[in-house]
Structure formats: C-alpha cells, structure tokens
Image (cartoon, helix red, strand yellow):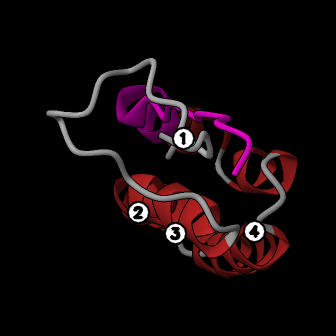
Amino acid sequence: MNGHIVHVDTTMVWLGALLFGPIFFLCIGEIGHGLANFLLGLALWAVFLGWIVWIVWAIAAPGIVRQKWLSKGYREMDAAEPSNYRGPSNKAS
C-alpha cells in the first residue's frame, strides 16, 4: 500500500452524471455504464423520456464510482481515521 488517498465528492459525481450523462461515465472509464446510458437514453428520447435515464444514472453514480475504486483495491476510510493516514507502518518497534 502506497498511502495514496482518493477523495470522492459525491455531490460533484452526481452533478457530473446529471449534466453530462454518458460522457461523464466514459471520461471516468466506466465504458459499460456510458454505453448503456447512451443507448437506453437514445431509445427513450424517441418518446421524449430520455431525461429519466440521466436522472436514474445520476442517482446511482456515487455508488458506481465508489464500487470502481473499491474494485481497484482501495478501501473506505472511517470518519474516525485521520485524513493524513498512510497505512500500517512497516517499522520494527
């Protein structure tokens, strides 16, 4: 563990997914979500309901991003852990 910390701002994730839809998911590397969002939205825009897809994916976006980082080996920090936490020390006591 190198002590690298990633802070995910759920408000900005939600806002990015709401405003940019499939482009947001493609930019963060979630190709499957980006393509599904685009294709389902495209089909529903034919009946003027494509905006529903963007709202649903925006609500789910913080969980999608959290799962992305967890699957890469990161872990969630408890509120009690200091933000400068660097992982367990390897020094012999």
Give the residue number, with chain letter if any, for mark 1.
Answer: 89
Name the outermost residue toward the top. Answer: 84
Q: Nearer the viewer, mark 1 or mark 3?
A: 1
| Dominant secondary-structure state across the stretch colored magenta | loop
Instruction: Tell which residue pokes out farthest to the left in this image.
Output: 80
| Disc 2 to disc 4, C-alpha distance | 19 Å
Q: Tell whether 26 sits left or right of 22.
A: right
Q: Which residue is mark 2?
A: 63
Q: Which residue is mark 4?
A: 38
Question: For mark 3, what is the residue?
Answer: 67
Which numbered disc, 3 or 2, marks the residue closer to the eye? Answer: 3
Three-letter code for the amino acid on which mark 4 is drawn: Phe
Of tags 1 and 2, the one toward the viewer is 1
Distance between mark 4 and mark 3 Cα atoms: 21 Å
Label 1, label 3: how many angstroms apart (C-alpha)?
A: 27 Å
What range of the chain is rendered magenta?
1-15
Location of residue 41 in the rendering, given as x and y in whole percent from the top left corner: 64, 70
* Tag in front: 4 or 3: 3
Image coords of residue 29 (percent x, y): 84, 58
Residue depicted at 50% across the width and 37% down the height:
13
Pointer 1 or 2: first along the chain: 2
Looking at this rendering, what residue extends furthest in the front direction? Answer: 93
> Considering only vertical position in the picture, is 86 above or below 69?
above
The quarter holding residue 3 reads top right
Local packing at callout 3 (Cα closer than 10 Å; few below 14, some 14-19, many 20+) is few
